[in-house]
Amino acid sequence: MAATKSRRWSDLSPRSRAALIAGAAVQFALLGAALADLRRRSPEEVNGPRKLWVAVSFINFVGPLAYFVLGRRRPPRPIG
């Protein structure tokens, strides 16, 4: 197996740097939104333990997206 040379920031092209910065900005925005939503919701509005969802939210893009899809309880829709 060949050894992989680590790339440094200075080795990246301007386009790669911009993509990395944009990805990090999206990640931090998702994390912030998930944590803010968890703070404002009551425990009855969250599926499962809140501390678990806080921990899961720190898993790259997957954690916050999983919280928004699976972690929030939605109010029942009125019939009629």
Image (tube, rainbow, N blue to C red):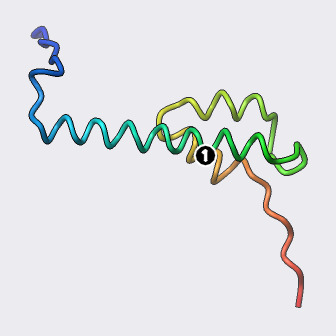
Crowd band around label 1 with a 10 angstrom C-alpha radius: few (<14), some (14–19), many (20+): some
Q: Which residue is mark 1?
A: 33
SS under mark 1: helix
The image quadrant of residue 12 is top left
**Nearest the camera: 9 or 73?**
9
Q: Amino acid at mark 1?
A: Ala
Residue under the point 62% across and 32% down = 56
Give the residue displayed 90% in from the left and 48% down from the top: 44
Q: Where 2 falls versus 34 (above or below)?
A: above
Q: Is residue 68 above or below residue 20?
A: below
Of residue 45 and residue 40, the one placed in the foreground of this image is 40
Left or right of residue 71, residue 5 in this image:
left
Hey, which quadrant is residue 10 in on the image? top left
Residue at (88% x, 80% y) in the render: 78
Residue located 65% across and 45% down the image: 67
* Percent coordinates x, y for residue 49 in the rendering: 81, 34
Q: Does residue 3 lie above or below 23 as drawn?
A: above
